[in-house]
Image: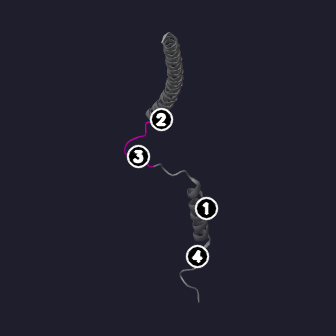
Amino acid sequence: MRSNIDPNFSDRQATARAAKQAILDKFKPKPTIQAAAPIDREAERARKREELRAAREADKAAKEHAKLMAKAAEVQARLDVAAESDEAKRSERKERKAAAKADARARREAKSAMRR
């Protein structure tokens, strides 16, 4: 007994054509989904450039600040050395004057003792 479901030649051809079309439809490009707000690539690039520029300027300012601080420290060290040198000269001069004064006093006392 034959059933009514048995396909004939034209039914099989139609089924094969539909299967081939389904396979081809898989490879067709699908429509893209549009973003609600389009991305502005140029503005994004400009923003990134500005961030880089700001970072470089901050680096440059930090390096310049470090140079200035190093130079100020060097100048302060020179001033400290000069102040120590001046203080050493002063103390040496005071000692020399005190020694000369003591020597003069000793001479006077010796001269005074000879008179008596």
Q: Are marks 3 and 1 in contact (CB under 8 Å)?
A: no
User: Which numbered mark, 4 or 3, is in the foreground of this view?
Assistant: 3
Vertical side of 2 occupied by 110: above or below = above
Label 1: how many Cα within 10 Å (few below 14, some 14–19, many 20+)? few
First-in-chain label (2 vs 3): 3
Q: CA distance from mark 2 to mark 3?
A: 22 Å
Residue bounds of the magenta highlight: 33-40
Q: Amino acid at mark 3?
A: Ala
User: Which numbered mark, 1 or 4, is in the foreground of this view?
Assistant: 1
Examine the structure image and report whether residue 38 is included in the region drawn in magenta.
yes
Q: Residue at x 57, y 66 (%)?
A: 14
Q: Position of residue 115 (x, y in %)?
A: 49, 10
Label number found at residue 20:
1
Q: CA distance from mark 4 to mark 3?
A: 47 Å
Residue at numbered disc 2: 48
Q: Quadrant of the N terminus?
A: bottom right
Q: Secondary structure at mark 2?
A: helix
Q: Residue at x 58, y 86 (%)?
A: 2
Residue at numbered disc 4: 7
Q: Amino acid at mark 2?
A: Lys
Examine the structure image and report whether residue 72 is included in the region drawn in magenta.
no
Q: Residue at x 56, y 57 (%)?
A: 25
Residue at numbered disc 3: 35
